[in-house]
Image (tube, helix red, strand yellow):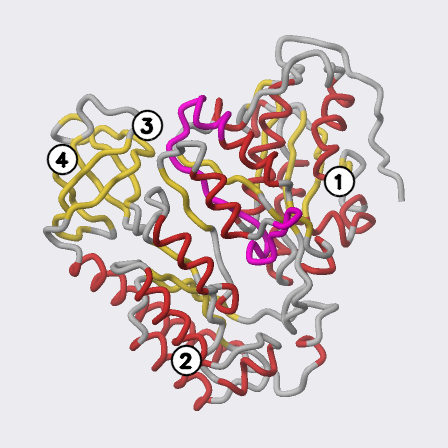
Amino acid sequence: MAARVSESPPQRDAGALAVSMRTLGCKVNRADSERIAAELMGCGVRLTDEADARVVVINTCTVTSEADRKARKAVRHALELPLSPVVVVTGCLAALDAEGLEALGDRVAVEADRDAVHQRVAALLGAAPGGAVAARAGEAFRTRVAVKVEDGCDAFCAYCIVPYARGVPRSVPVEEVSAEVSHLVASGTAEVVLTGINIGKYRSGGVGLPGLVESVAATGVGRIRLSSIEPLDLTSELLGVLSKTSQVCPHLHVPLQSGSDAVLTAMGRGYTAAEYVGRLDAARAALPGVSITTDVMVGFPGESEADFEATRTLVSQAGLSRLHVFRYSKRAGTRAARMDRQVPPDISAGRAATLRAEDARLRREWAGARLGQEAEVLVERLVADADGVAAIGTTGDYLTARLDGAGLSCGDLVRVRVGRELAGQVVAERF
């Protein structure tokens, strides 16, 4: 169904090229949005708040039914803004339900092709997409930049709609990734996050993820972080490269989802709880002191109290530093949505609350274990406080740190000594 939005350029005025962007969902979506924003700036577009925008771009997620609800709510909100902007919707929900999104209003334009969003917006605004050299993400986002190296997934986990929305794995050629990172380094970017739906599937010719890390390190970038890596992709080859690459952050995000073998099998995850722990042990042997965070899902169909207890026990004993806890949400089109023994919402909520309390404990313990140790902080923002200016940033092992910001700028890498934990942050002292 074609969008009903007029493609005729509007009359130009001082605010005619004002565009806002809203991103929902994962780090890959954020990387897509940063690239779209850079391309828009290359068209002469001015990025602004929603209230001043002539076009609002919404990059949607569709991983759960709740994600769909939030995406539609964001579109409705944008349609009610004072300047009556055109709402350009892209992302995963746009790929699966363009007709449903267009039905939300006459000013909704769906562009499922993320690579074409800037051209669509430029046409709506009467801008010239080829009239300026495209800005690169690093010129606007100078601290940590997500670099998308891969898109798509063919794992087809029982609960996940993403393979249907994003397609099979596709990798960015290693030469293009290295060129982008080199440009970011020249623009002042201190850290790149190699991002994808399943970066363990990265393949460019004969180069896999280990070779990509080596290529990115050769650009001289200050820090390299992996966004997320599946347990079975933590190979000895990859761990060997990570261990000898000084710029690699001592932090891995390794999704677990469940500590129950029965639930893991039903999910289609392809490993057992013991195999997961074994991969973590191998990572710690290769990368002493590495911080390991994870994703955990509760309430998957058929999850019993014994299954949940297996998950709680594993995450409490596996030496993790942080949990991202998700409640299972039935998503039409997935195998899990057709399964029997759906877990009642109140039970899922109670299990999630238990694991979030466990997460709080793990964060405190990790911060406590780092007390008095050296760390490197990437300064991400400066804030006024009673003592002048404070810098807020992230350590290599993914702690949020607060330190004296005098003389510092966003993007600086600063050596510190880790102090006490306070309100979710560690107080750090500069050397």
- Residue situated in front as seen by the camera: 81 or 154: 154
The image shows residue 94, relative to residue 53, as above or below, that is below
Q: Nearer the viewer, mark 4 or mark 1?
A: 4
Mark 3 touching mark 1, by CB under 8 A?
Answer: no
* Residue 356 higher or lower than 263, as above or below: above
Q: Residues within 10 Å of mark 1 (few under 14, many from 20)?
A: few
Image height of 346 relative to 378, above or below: below
| Residue 417 point in image, percent of width and height | 13, 44
- Mark 3–mark 2 CB contact (< 8 Å): no
Q: Secondary structure at mark 4?
A: strand
The residue identified by callout 4 is 430
- Residue 110 lies left or right of residue 288; in this view the side is right
Instruction: Name the kind of residue labelled 2 in the image.
Output: Thr
Which residue was labeled with disc 3?
410
- Earlier-in-chain disc, 3 versus 1: 1
Q: Which residues are magenta?
A: 182-206
Q: Which residue is mark 1?
A: 113
